[in-house]
Image (cartoon, rainbow, N blue to C red):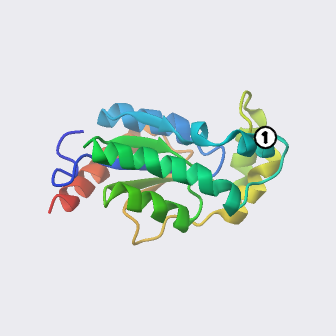
Amino acid sequence: MTGAGAGQGPPIVLVLGVTGSGKTTVGKAVAELLHLPFVEGDDFHPAANVAKMSAGRALDDADREPWLRALADRVRHSVEAGEGLVVACSALKRAYRDGLRAAARGRLWCLYLALDRDTAWDRVSRRTGHFMPARLVDSQFETLEPLEPDEPGMTMDATADLPAQLTRVRAAVGRFGEHTAR
């Protein structure tokens, strides 16, 4: 995306939410819309994390630390290269987002996909080929700290019509880019 964050470079867009909120689907659509590369946060989990979640055990902060560090390194690489990026990552706690925000050097914009517990459970219980079982949905909501007003970004209903929402996302990221260029 040209112009966004012109003074500092293109945006780093973090698509966040609980499991089943559609982070990958929406993240890929946002990346295409903004002409930015897409990164799937799940690909950065160490094998031990994937095994733990596959066994139905929730991750704790110690488990998430190497995963978040690897994602922060990827974000930092994009910033240093002057590139934008879209990252799909649960980033359930403010502290996790703050770490990614520090790596992005003021260029992180968050798209929080808000979803209720029942819809998340329904979606996760029907999907195939993913390591996260439906029995971990509750742990995601227990950990979740929704986007706060002082965090650059917006909240979007995860069940809303995607094409209509993408228009709002494009405008919001553009405004963020104008603001960071000052």
Q: Is residue 133 visible?
A: no
Q: Which of the 4 quarters of the picture holds residue 47?
A: top right
Q: Is residue 174 left or right of residue 48?
A: left
Nearest the eye: 60 or 174: 60
Q: Which of the 4 quarters of the picture holds residue 100?
A: bottom left
As shown in the figure, which amino acid type bears the numbered disc 1?
Ala
- Can you name the residue that lies furthest to the top here? 129
SS class of the residue under badge 1? helix
Q: Residue 15, image x and y in percent?
A: 48, 48
Q: Residue 56, image x and y in percent?
A: 84, 46
Report how many numbered discs are placed on residues in the image.
1
Image quarter in which the C terminus is found? bottom left
Which residue is rendered at x = 37% and y = 33% of the image?
A: 37
Q: Is residue 78 visible?
A: yes
Which residue is rendered at x = 72% and y = 64% of the image?
A: 142
Q: Would you name the residue on which mark 1 appears? A: 51
Q: Residue 152, image x and y in percent?
A: 36, 62
Decide: few, some or many residues near mark 1? Use Cα within 10 Å; few <14, some 14-19, many ≥20. Answer: some
Image quarter in which the N terminus is found? top left
Nearest the eye: 44 or 153: 44
Q: Say above or below: 93 vs 11.
A: below
Q: Residue 51, image x and y in percent?
A: 78, 40
Which residue is rendered at x = 78% and y = 50% of the image?
A: 136
